[in-house]
Image (cartoon, rainbow, N blue to C red):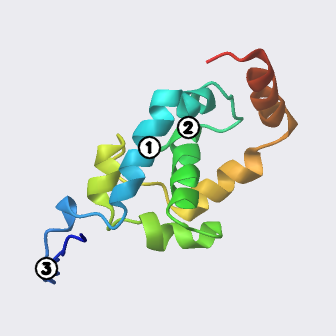
Amino acid sequence: MRKKFSIKVQFQTTTQWEEITAHGLLLAAWQFAEKCGALLKWEKISYPMKKVKYSPFDKLQTLWASVVTGCQHTVEINDSLGAHEKALARAVGLERFPDQSQVNRLLQATKTPQVEHWRLDERSGSD
């Protein structure tokens, strides 16, 4: 016997954007990645960049989050994870997500040493 589900959908307008996210499932993926230690490996990678507001690690996390939320190109980061995603950013330890221009700078700074660091870390099986 099949159960009947009655789902009520409600639409509300709000100005309380600090408490709402369009990417609730990203938090589950984020927690899983942290538990596996996937994100921590990125923190060890050295980049020839100075931290002004965001570290290279913050930018790598934003790049990962953009892929998980369905961005097909970095130009979509501001629309997907921009200033309107304050609750999600706070949940992952950021005041807000870096803009796509910051992520692009990180990608441009990614050279052979950074890729080799990742490869060596994977081969050695270190956390």
N-terminal-most mark, 3 or 1: 3
Mark 3 to mark 1: distance in Å?
Answer: 28 Å
Between residues 29 and 105, which one lies in front from this camera angle?
A: 29
Q: Which residue is found at the position 40% from the left and 38% from the top?
A: 31
Mark 1 to mark 2: distance in Å?
Answer: 14 Å
- Which amino acid is tagged 3? Lys
- Which amino acid is tagged 2? Phe
Tell me the residue that label 1 is attached to: 30
> Which secondary structure, mark 3?
loop
Could you classify mark 3 by the number of other residues whose Cα lies within 10 Å: few (under 14), some (14-19), or many (20 or more)? few
Q: Are marks 3 and 2 in contact (CB under 8 Å)?
A: no
> Which secondary structure, mark 2?
helix
Q: Position of residue 123 (x, y in %)?
A: 80, 21
- Dot in front, 1 or 2: 1
Between residues 121 and 54, which one lies in front from this camera angle?
A: 121
Whether residue 109 sits left or right of residue 55 in the image: it is right
Could you classify mark 1 by the number of other residues whose Cα lies within 10 Å: few (under 14), some (14-19), or many (20 or more)? some
Q: Position of residue 44 (x, y in %)?
A: 63, 24
Vertical side of 63 occupied by 37: above or below: above
What's the mark number on residue 57?
Answer: 2
Could you classify mark 2 by the number of other residues whose Cα lies within 10 Å: few (under 14), some (14-19), or many (20 or more)? many
Q: Position of residue 88 (x, y in %)?
A: 32, 54
- Which amino acid is tagged 1? Trp
Between residues 20 and 11, which one lies in front from this camera angle?
A: 11
Q: Residue furthest front?
A: 1
Tell me the residue that label 3 is attached to: 8
Vertical side of 64 occupied by 43: above or below: above
Q: Position of residue 42 (x, y in %)?
A: 62, 32
Mark 3 to mark 2: distance in Å?
Answer: 40 Å
N-terminal-most mark, 1 or 2: 1
